[in-house]
Image (tube, rainbow, N blue to C red):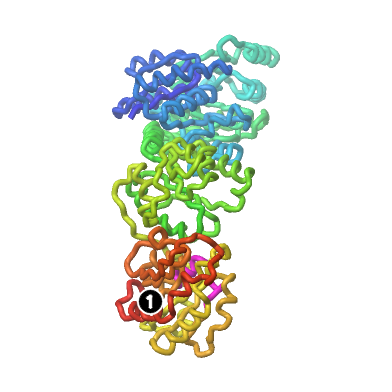
């Protein structure tokens, strides 16, 4: 694997130091690593380690910087880059566009509290968003809308070999002069002026001190440095404060200092200098902000003070200067924490895992917004996709009414419910597309195959889009199949699309996964009805959707069948259906207890568990048919206006009865023939009864009471 890290520059600093440390560690593990920046003092160190560096002006905040995208793509192809990792906003914009063009994964690391304006949004567009602290994680989730499963906490790590532990300075007598270090970029948000005013108070306490200010401003700037110098003069600190400038010997400075003070005024993303101080064994005082809280536990391994509270900072500094033994104890605890949580090895390992995950993991969206039966018919495809892409992140976009039935599907990472009616409006369609864009899917598999679902995947910017070409909107697919009109069985029909995705082995077996809570509830109902395990149960699913009244076998036929079953077979009849079907069950004689009316009393998950207990089900072309097929229940399926060759589910124990009249299949919700619903009326009760009796006589495929 080869990774391109992109950052503004390689001058001295925590982000830059971390980039170099990571690059060297990855190279030592045999991984490929390339770094791109506008240059700086650390380039020489990289190149001495044999790491390739490309110098491009990717730090300049200008629209013209986007012209560098083509050059970055050239580097990607020349170096055969697998993953781009961007560490700042301008490099991220360039890297994101280059990654899109080169079709490789894109990762970001957020090293600061970005304001939530458009130019910062790119930091949330990584397939994984690395954050150094829990506070930055919350910021990206709450303010940038990044899904928690895309945020990866990777605290910065320090190379302990470069920062050896020397706590012995706290042993023995107190020094003649205490050395206090403030290390960081010269900028108002780092609080150097507030630190100097706290130092003024510490001097008034009578401590003999020497203060080191290590750092500097960005190249070509010195306004804040002059402000620091002015404050030093105003407070009369010229003899005790030394401005050291930008220093590379950080480990040496920390070793020689008695105390490190971090005086930031705004939340720190992490606070690398604190773990470096902990590595060498130097006690710390820091402001109680942001990522600092992930490193320092107040009173245990350092002292925390409110930001801008100069008096509290002075008291904390004075406390640690007075109590050398406490400094030693805090230094030892912080060193132990660094070894456990903030050393270089965990940082490298976690980052490498992110790279491997985004390189190997395809994020696949399966779109199936149809009726429940159609959703069940998609379960073999979910299994085949999972087998073909075992490390993929597989999401099903499904009508919210049916989401619960697949909540226990082992092949899915996620079920994404949507109110289907909202997609009939342009507003709803665009909102869902925006939501899907944030998910960064690589592949969409459209089993709904409508113009709106094709448009949805296109607007979601999913690079690879698979489905059937059914008209002009099929042109939005990148990998269309043109065989939609062929009358194939349902799973084989879907397999045409899957074959374009690289699935080569057909597996038609349907599956459903019972919900434990629903199972328990149905078992309770069965106990109440005193149904013994040997009791034979025949289910009648009489209803159909209002749009498909033509799929419904006449209700009087069902009543006659129920009476005949009770009279001539040793079984109990179970009436099934939704609340909309309650009127259909009204004329069934239930007084004897031989007919159990559960119409309108079950949720979908409970219906699954109830059908699972049947010996035989009689139904039309409805969801109950597909549930029974998935649960291995013998079924007599009555087909009228639809073609069983295209819609009968696969599986053993499915008996299809249909008449094959000249008008079949019509696919109409209203029958216009002189003999209304002749296709179903010509399926006689006696014929269905004989099929049920035959199935009852055979060994059950599935029965659990």
State the image coordinates of residue 1 (x, y, percent, origin top left).
33, 30
* Residue on which the image places disc 1: 615
Q: Is residue 519 visible?
A: no
Number of marks in picture? 1
Above or below residue 269? Residue 59 is: above
Q: Is residue 574 visible?
A: yes
Q: Residue furthest top?
A: 220
The residue at the point 65 percent across, 12 percent down is 223
Q: Residue furthest right?
A: 234
Above or below residue 440? Residue 702 is: below
State the image coordinates of residue 146 (x, y, percent, origin top left).
54, 39
> How many residues crowd mark 1 within 10 Å: few (<14), some (14–19), many (20+)?
many
Near-viewer residue (164 or 85)? 85
Q: Is residue 600 magenta?
A: yes
Q: Is residue 167 magenta?
A: no
State the image coordinates of residue 642 (x, y, percent, origin top left).
46, 62
Report the quarter where the C terminus lies: bottom left
State the image coordinates of residue 141 (x, y, percent, origin top left).
56, 40
- Horizontally, residue 148 falls left or right of residue 638, namely right
The residue at the point 36 percent across, 69 percent down is 654
Near-viewer residue (660 or 517)? 660
Q: Secondary structure at mark 1?
A: loop
- Horizontally, residue 358 falls left or right of residue 240, namely left
Magenta residue span: 598-610
Near-viewer residue (89 or 16)? 89
The residue at the point 43 percent across, 75 percent down is 683
Near-viewer residue (56 or 98)? 98
Above or below residue 280? Residue 154 is: below
């Amino acid at each position: 694997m080869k990774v391109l890290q992109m950052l503004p520059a390689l001058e001295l600093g925590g982000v830059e130091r971390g980039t170099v440390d990571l690059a060297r560690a990855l190279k030592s593990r045999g991984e490929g690593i390339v770094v791109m920046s506008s240059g700086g003092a650390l380039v020489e160190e990289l190149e001495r380690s044999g790491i390739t560096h490309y110098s491009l002006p990717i730090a300049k905040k200008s629209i013209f910087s986007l012209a560098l995208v083509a050059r970055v793509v050239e580097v990607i192809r020349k170096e055969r880059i697998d993953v781009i990792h961007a560490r700042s906003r301008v490099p991220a914009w360039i890297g994101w566009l280059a990654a899109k063009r080169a079709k490789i994964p894109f990762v970001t690391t957020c090293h600061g509290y970005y304001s939530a304006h458009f130019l910062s949004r790119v930091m949330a567009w990584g397939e994984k968003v690395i954050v150094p602290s829990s506070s930055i994680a919350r910021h990206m989730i709450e303010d940038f809308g990044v899904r928690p499963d895309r945020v990866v906490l990777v605290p910065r790590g320090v190379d302990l070999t470069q920062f050896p532990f020397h706590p012995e300075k706290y042993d023995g007598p107190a020094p003649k002069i205490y050395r206090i270090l403030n290390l960081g970029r010269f900028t108002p948000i780092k609080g150097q002026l507030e630190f100097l005013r706290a130092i003024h108070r510490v001097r008034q306490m009578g401590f003999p001190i020497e203060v080191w200010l290590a750092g500097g401003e960005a190249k070509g700037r010195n306004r804040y440095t002059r402000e620091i110098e002015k404050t030093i003069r105003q407070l009369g600190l010229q003899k005790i404060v030394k401005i050291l400038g930008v220093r590379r010997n950080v480990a040496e400075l920390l070793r020689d200092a008695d105390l490190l003070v971090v005086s930031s005024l705004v939340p720190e993303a992490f606070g690398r200098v604190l773990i470096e101080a902990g590595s060498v064994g130097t006690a710390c005082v820091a402001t109680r902000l942001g990522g600092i809280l992930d490193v320092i536990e107040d009173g245990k391994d350092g002292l925390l003070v409110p930001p801008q509270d100069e008096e509290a900072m002075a008291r904390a500094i004075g406390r640690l200067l007075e109590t050398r033994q406490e400094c030693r104890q805090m230094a030892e605890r912080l060193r132990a924490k660094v070894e456990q949580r903030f050393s270089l090895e965990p940082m490298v390992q976690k980052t490498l895992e992110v790279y491997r995950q985004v390189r190997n993991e395809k994020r696949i969206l399966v779109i199936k917004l149809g009726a429940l039966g159609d959703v069940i018919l998609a379960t073999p495809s979910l299994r085949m996709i999972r087998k073909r892409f075992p490390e993929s992140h597989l999401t099903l976009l499904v009508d919210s009414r049916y989401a619960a039935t697949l909540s226990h599907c082992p092949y899915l990472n996620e079920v994404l419910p949507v109110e289907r009616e909202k997609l009939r409006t342009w507003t709803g369609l665009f909102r869902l597309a925006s939501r899907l864009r944030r998910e960064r899917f690589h592949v969409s598999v459209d089993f709904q195959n409508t113009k709106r679902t094709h448009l949805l995947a296109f607007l979601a910017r999913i690079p690879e889009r698979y489905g059937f070409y059914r008209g002009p909107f099929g042109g939005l697919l990148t990998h269309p199949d043109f065989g939609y009109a062929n009358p194939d069985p349902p799973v084989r029909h879907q397999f045409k699309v899957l074959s374009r995705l690289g699935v080569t082995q057909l597996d038609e077996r349907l599956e459903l996964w019972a919900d434990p809570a629903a199972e328990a509830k149905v078992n309770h109902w069965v106990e109440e009805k005193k149904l013994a395990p040997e009791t034979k149960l025949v289910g009648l699913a009489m209803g159909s959707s209002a749009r498909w009244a033509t799929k419904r076998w006449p209700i009087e036929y069902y009543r006659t069948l129920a009476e005949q079953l009770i009279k001539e077979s040793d079984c109990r009849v179970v009436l099934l259906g939704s609340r909309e079907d309650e009127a259909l069950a009204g004329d069934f004689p239930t007084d004897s207890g031989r007919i159990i009316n559960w119409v309108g009393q079950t949720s979908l998950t409970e219906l699954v568990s109830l059908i699972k207990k049947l010996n035989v089900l009689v139904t039309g072309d409805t969801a109950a048919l597909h549930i029974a097929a998935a649960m291995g229940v013998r079924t007599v399926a009555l087909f009228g206006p639809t073609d069983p060759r295209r819609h009968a589910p696969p599986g053993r124990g499915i008996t299809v009865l249909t008449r094959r009249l000249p008008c079949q299949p019509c696919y109409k919700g209203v029958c216009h023939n002189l003999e209304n619903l002749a296709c179903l009326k010509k399926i006689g009760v006696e014929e269905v009864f004989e099929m049920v009796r035959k199935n009852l006589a055979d060994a059950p495929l599935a029965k659990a009471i």
